[in-house]
Amino acid sequence: MKPLLLLICILLPLATFASEEDPGIHPIRTIKAHDGVVASLAFSPDAKYILSGGADKTMKLWEAATGKLVRTFEGHTGMITSVACSPDGKYALSGSWDRTVRLGDIQTGKETAVFLGHESMVNTVAFSPNGKYALSGSSDNMLKLWEVQTGKEVRTLKGHTGPVTSAAFSPDGKHIASAGHDTWDRSKVRIWEVETGMNIFSRELPNSPIPLSLAFLPDSRHVYFTTSGRSTALLDIDNKEMREIGKHSKAVYTVAVSPSGKLGLSGDVTGMLKLYEFEYGTLRTKFLTDRNEIWSVAYSPDGQNVISGGKDGTISLWQALE
């Protein structure tokens, strides 16, 4: 192969990558969704709908293709901090500052259950991959596992010594990852066995004063999370090693993982979203939200779109082909 042709073959793939100096891609759609912060977002399994929860104490369902409001779920008496959609797309889960976790019917908008037991605000909720269990994490330092059909508390996971800010089930359903402020200046990521409730591993993160966010990769062996404010990292559960992935100029509040498990999305307080490749930590794309402080992000299950929720109550949507 001629030297010039070889050089072109080497450099051509790199042309798809962004640089730190790029201004960023603007969204294809923006929705004025809530009065106040959009604290949490989730896609339905078929990627046709978006769930949002906000400071106005409501959870809302939107058409992803049009931005049209489908329905509003009410009942919470405090800010909604976290939302999730069940794997079958039938139910919506929400956690709130009012210390409750609520289950709603997606089709009717009716509340079907209220899970009571936390002694402080609920910061994070999630469904198990089989839809049988709901998970909640709270500022009472505990995680609780609930049976969705009965509303029965199955187990309380104790170990964090400060507020639990984020939690997720592994895609294989065997483990839970949680993040919490175990002391004022140090946070911990903990891994738990779902079957026993045992804390099998923990990783301390010094200088982590802001809320942590985390997400499992599809392989169930890696967790992507915010670290010491301005960066993100990938944790290998098997060898317990941590590798830095993304860097931001200001604090990173939220992360998400692409369906393929190859890309990590992170949003910061300047309104910048960055998409990094896990393999080499390469910046793939930047998304700009006109400096709207980002509190929540989500990746569509089909890998076609990413969304963010802002401090000003807006939802922004971009096309994001892998």
Image: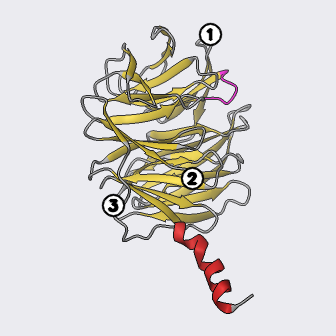
- In this view, 3 is above or below 23: below
Is disc 2 placed on a helix, strand or loop? strand
- In this view, 291 is above or below 244: above
Q: Label 1 belongs to which residue?
A: 150
Q: Residues within 10 Å of mark 2 (few under 14, many from 20)?
A: many
> Can the viewer see residue 119?
no
Q: Earlier in the sequence, mark 2 or mark 1?
A: 1
Q: Earlier in the sequence, mark 3 or mark 2?
A: 2
- Amino acid beneath label 1: Thr
Residue situated in front as seen by the camera: 22 or 15: 15
Residue plotted at (49% across, 33% down): 42
Q: Is residue 51 magenta?
A: no
3 or 1: mark nearer the eye: 3
Measured in 3D between alpha carbons, the distance from the residue under mark 2 to the one under mark 1, in whole angstroms, is 32 Å
Measured in 3D between alpha carbons, the distance from the residue under mark 3 to the one under mark 1, in whole angstroms, is 43 Å
- Amino acid beneath label 2: Tyr
> Can the viewer see residue 164?
yes
Q: Label 2 belongs to which residue?
A: 224
Residue plotted at (46% across, 67% down): 18
Residue 198 image position (x, y, % from top left): 69, 38
Specify whether 247 is left or right of 153.
left
